[in-house]
């Protein structure tokens, strides 16, 4: 089983001991217009390190930057995509698409449903005080794009497997349980640390925390964090983190 590392833009992390490195961000597209990440991927490739890129869901404004980024890569590279449009662009470019966790997330997933569908206000604890955490769900158009693709359905599997005999998907290691199996011919890359709760739509870079920010604690047990537009908790901080086994269909573990 491969050990993979996910590095966000602007971070400096040692890559020793990892079989594969992924660079990028699934909620912020600013890095697409910079050569920094593609230069780093190319440099890692030259030293024999396998490297890939994690890309955000695309808006029309990001499409040209995304295509430019793909063109700057010197070798065939795995690109984690988070919407069907990015998938098609990667396929056409000759690089290898990996289905990202925004694309593979299901509406029924309680990690998203409890926050962004059924509750927009929630009481959380900050230090010793109870405060009201207000979280607005993404617009319906975005919710349908990254929540409405049931990757474990036969129909969706057929859509992507008609292009490739084998596909890799990115999933979160969920304390409330993992799927018993995935569609045949799917490999799974399992994210084992920052578990997605929801994605907030972009508004202003001035209000977007570039560093990890503690939002509060749900039920006094699980800490909820925000970094850029991603809201998440840490698998290592969940009560039963050591008791959940890795499904047999997982071929890579990714930590961030």
Image: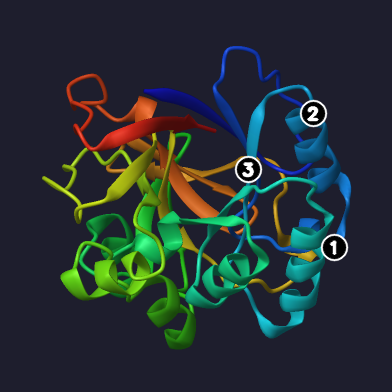
Asked if the residue under mark 1 is in contact with the one under mark 2, i.e. CB atoms within 8 Å, the reply is no
Percent position of residue 133, x then y: 45, 59
Crowd tier of the residue under label 3, counting other residues whose Cα lies within 10 Å: few below 14, some 14–19, many 20 or above:
many
Residue 221 visible in the snapshot: no
Mark 3 vs mark 1, foreground winner is 3
The kind of secondary structure element at disc 1 is: helix
**Residue nearest the viewer, comparing 255 with 231:** 255
> In the shown orientation, is residue 174 left or right of residue 93?
left
**Cα gap from disc 3 to disc 2, whole angstroms:** 13 Å
Mark 2 lies on a secondary structure that is helix
Question: Which is more N-terminal, label 2 or label 3?
Answer: 2
Whether residue 196 appears in this view of the structure is yes
**Foreground: disc 3 or disc 2:** 2
Q: Residue at x 64, y 52 (%)?
A: 25
Give neighbour class at mark 1: few <14, some 14-19, many 20+ (Cα, 10 Å). Answer: some
Q: Which residue is mark 1?
A: 33
Q: Quadrant of the C terminus?
A: top right
Q: Judging from the image, what secondary structure is the residue with disc 3 in?
A: strand
Tell me the distance, in whole angstroms, between the alpha carbons under discs 3 and 1.
17 Å
In which quadrant of the rendered image does the N terminus lie? top left
Residue 162, image x, y percentages? 34, 70
Q: Is residue 134 above or below residue 190?
A: below
Q: Which mark is residue 52?
A: 3
């Amino acid at each position: 089983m491969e050990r993979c590392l996910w590095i966000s833009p602007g971070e400096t992390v040692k890559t020793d001991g990892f079989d594969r490195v992924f660079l990028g961000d699934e909620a912020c597209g600013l890095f697409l217009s910079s050569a920094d990440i593609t230069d780093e991927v190319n440099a890692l490739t030259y030293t024999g390190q396998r490297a890939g890129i994690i890309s955000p869901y695309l808006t029309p404004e990001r499409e040209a930057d995304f295509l430019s980024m793909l063109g700057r890569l010197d070798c065939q590279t795995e690109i984690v995509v988070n919407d069907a449009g990015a998938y098609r662009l990667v396929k056409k470019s000759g690089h290898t698409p990996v289905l990202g966790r925004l694309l593979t997330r299901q509406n029924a997933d309680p990690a998203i449903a409890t926050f962004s569908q059924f509750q927009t206000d929630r009481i959380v604890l900050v230090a010793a005080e109870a405060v009201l955490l207000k979280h607005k769900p993404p617009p319906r158009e975005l919710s349908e794009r990254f929540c409405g693709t049931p990757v474990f359905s036969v129909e969706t599997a057929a859509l992507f497997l008609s292009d490739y005999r084998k596909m890799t998907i990115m999933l979160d290691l969920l304390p409330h349980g993992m799927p018993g199996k995935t569609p045949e011919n799917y490999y799974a890359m399992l994210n084992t640390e920052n578990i997605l709760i929801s994605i907030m739509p972009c508004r202003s870079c001035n209000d977007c925390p570039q560093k990890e920010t503690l939002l509060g604690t749900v039920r006094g047990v699980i800490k909820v964090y925000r970094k850029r537009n991603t809201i998440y908790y840490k698998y290592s901080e969940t009560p039963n983190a050591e008791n959940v086994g890795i499904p047999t269909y997982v071929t890579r573990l990714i930590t961030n």
